[in-house]
Amino acid sequence: MKTSSWKLVFAAIAGIPVLGAGYLASPPTPAFADANSVTFPPLDRLVHYTTVRRGVTREHMLTSRQALAAIKAGQPVPRGTHVVLVDYQSDVLHRYLVSEKVGDGVDDWQYQWFWPDRTIKADENTAQCYSCHRSRQDRQFLFTSTDAMNFDETTQ
């Protein structure tokens, strides 16, 4: 019995360097944001309701007519609403940032980054988007809610 116990202890100790070498040979990959249900919307069906400019950055904000009507009426935007930030850097399309209302609750928003070719930036941590926009929960999670409320399609 004593011999068996020592063999087990020796095997366990001898295995530690093997496990360590295996770990160092293939370190874990970095964690990426989980995929979500945000879809790329048909941009031709959305309304450009404002443009935000900061230095070389120009951001066109788009959403649906239904969402704009709901915002103006002080009602929640409907499920399926997309809000798109079309991001230009030095007048070159850099990305699309898309938020989508995925449920009926006030905070049922998800976010996604799309490249100009409309593929998803797989390593973007979209939880940060939600975290920041949560500060605007009382305004449909929009930093441009005042622009949406003041938008007048007849002047376009």
Image (spheres, grey):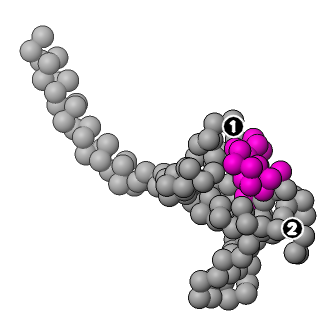
Would you say residue 61 is visible in this rendering? Answer: no
Q: In the rendered view, tell whether residue 110 sits above or below residue 95.
A: above
| Circles 1, 2 touching at the beta carbon (< 8 Å) | no
Amino acid type of the residue tagged 2 in the rendering: Glu
Reading the image, the residue beneath label 1 is 103
Give the x, y percent position of residue 56: 62, 88
Give the x, y percent position of residue 23: 36, 49
Q: In the rendered view, tell whether residue 4 sits above or below residue 113.
A: above
Query: Disc 1 vs disc 2: which is toward the camera?
Result: 2
Estimate the spatial distance between the alpha carbons at disc 1 and disc 2, rounded to whole Å: 27 Å
Reading the image, the residue beneath label 2 is 153
Give the x, y percent position of residue 96: 71, 67
Please give the name of the residue rendered at 69% of the width and 48% of the height, measured from the top-left corner.
74
Query: In which quadrant of the rendered view does residue 6 lie?
Result: top left
- Look at the image and say whether residue 70 sits in the magenta stretch: yes
Determine crowd level at label 2: few under 14, some 14-19, many 20+ residues with C-alpha closer than 10 A. Answer: few
Q: Is residue 27 left or right of residue 61?
A: left
Circle nearer the N terminus (1, 2): 1
Query: In which quadrant of the rendered view does residue 101 lie?
Result: top right
Would you say residue 86 is visible in this rendering? Answer: yes
- Secondary structure at numbered mark 2: helix
Q: Is residue 71 left or right of residue 17?
A: right
Which region shows up in magenta?
66-84
Please give the name of the residue rendered at 35% of the width and 54% of the height, measured from the top-left corner.
24
Q: In the rendered view, tell whether residue 89 sits above or below residue 113.
A: below
Amino acid type of the residue tagged 1 in the rendering: Gly
Question: Depth check: 98 or 73 in front?
Answer: 73
